[in-house]
Image: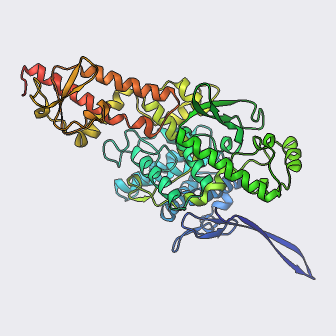
Amino acid sequence: MPIKQTAAITHNQADSPVATLKQTLKTARSGETYVYESDEWRIGRTLKLPWSALDMNGLTDRVSPKVLDSFRKTMSELVEEVSERYARDLFDRILSLLHYCTDEITIKSFELWRAQLSTRQISTPTRLNYIHQCRAALIAWSDGCYPGLERGLGNHVHQIKVGSRNNTGQIVREQCPVRGPFSQIEEVALLRWIHAAYADEILPLQAYAILLIQVEFGCRPVEIGAMRACDVIEDQAEHIYELAIPTAKGSRNYRAANRKLELPPDLYALLKQVIVEGQNKVAQAWGQTIPPQLSKKLPLFVGRRLLAAGSSEDFEHRLAKTPRTFDVHIHSHIIGSLQKCPVTTSRLDGDLLPISLYRFRRTVATRLAEAGASDELIATVLGHVTTDTVKVYTAHTYEDQAACDGIMVEAWEPVLDIKEKRLLGEPIAGQAKIYLNRDDQVGNCAQLCGSGILNCYACPKFHPFIDAPHNEALAQVVAERQKRISQGLSGQQVDSLDLPIAAIKATIRLCEEQKERGTSHK
């Protein structure tokens, strides 16, 4: 957990009034600590953010204090999430943008800044990098809901297309590599690190569980903080596990309603372990056994304020008076653990992968949209009352599913290696047949492994029949993907079907080409 302390430095002199200077220590992702109020932040071994540059460039006199204060708050978040080199780049971009601003950063000022880049003697890749970086910083500013941005600027920079630095299939449409959804490659690498870090005791149990909830459901951080032990549910009648995600956004209707989403059994077991460990800590801190009727009211994730409550009586009194008083601040609870993540991304030229809690939320929404989920389903999973704000999270998804699948087929081509020579006009004697159902065969297999139809089409040992119901196989896999989405699943549980869908579509295309030419292969 990052260091975050406040100290008051007081100078008492007989001939001068008392002066008090507030100093807030914070920690960058590199592990370096800095004083938030200072004119210079050391964010790495050799890198600093020189806030004195604002005064040197005359910006403190010309730009609104509200804008400068928000700039500092935004950078404080970013230095926790990105590498020191990239944080300095973001700082420099906003610093240069502020030369075109006064009371707020407007769309016009941003476009003026962008236009002047074209007049500078810099290469096109450098110019595009500068725009990428400025856009990333402004999106982080907008995400933080800090004042100083013109209404609509966030959406404006989201929609800017500045060219692609990625190979086909890595990023299908323009996405922010700092605050947008993770790419599939990034998501897989991050998930592997999360599991490995927990196994190696780098991640504590509570941080591990919080991250898996984010991967699975993309909850608002405040919703996770508001969860209680009773929100982890076993429905014995339906033989399913559920997580009740409470309403916690804003001050009204706190925990007045919830949305129940199905929990994978392994995540349910992990959350039960979190409950047991947390309640044992509380019992030890209070010096008393936790009554069963009270245990369900305890927060799912235990923080310092709960441990300091002292007794069950004090807990219930304070809970009744201020219901959210014991809610854990999720960002502060896990940011120290996330700063240890060594995963890098090719979208930032091999730099550290920027990680923030809202990236998980956007990723869940993006994967649902990519898989063809309706706005209504996405809104339900995310906890939106209407579908009006769904586009905030899905603005960077594919135009439509057909475009998505077409791109994915091309992206997976090196993996699929589906060549015409693998197609068969008739079965090969002595080879195992792959059945779609009891009556329909779709191909031969040189080495039957029993892994199922979902894995056959992408396997190099599978030989599809030209005249086979491959469209029915495709319909089965697409239906399975839609079923998983309707169950509230996301991430790898849905994305794992991209490869078989792409493989079947590639097979169908080759078979149709063969039929048009009137040839067959044995």
| Horizontal arrangement in the rendering, residue 287 relative to residue 459 (left or right) | right
Colour mode of the rendering: rainbow
Q: How many marks?
A: 0
Figure quadrant of residue 467: top left
Between 122 and 292, the one lying in front of the other is 292
Q: Work out whether residue 445 or residue 254 is closer to the camera in this orientation and state it.
A: 445
Residue 310 x, y percent position in the rendering: 85, 56
Instruction: Judge whether residue 235 can be spotted in this image.
Output: yes
Where residue 79 sits, quadrant-wise, is: bottom right
Task: Tell me residue 460's x, y (percent).
Answer: 19, 39
Horizontal side of residue 182 vs 98, given as left or right: left
Residue lying at the far right in this picture: please name it.
14
Name which residue lies at 64% across and 58% down: 72
Q: Is residue 74 visible?
A: no
Q: Which residue is located at x 71 percent, y 50 percent?
A: 328
State the residue lying farthest toward the top. Answer: 439
Whether residue 509 sits left or right of residue 162 in the image: it is: left
Place of residue 320 in the rendered image (x, y in percent of width and height, measured from the top left): 86, 41
Q: Residue at x 56, y 50 (%)?
A: 356
> If the image is split into quadrants, where does the C terminus sit?
top left
Q: Position of residue 380 (x, y in %)?
A: 59, 28
Residue at position x 58%, y 41% in the image: 268
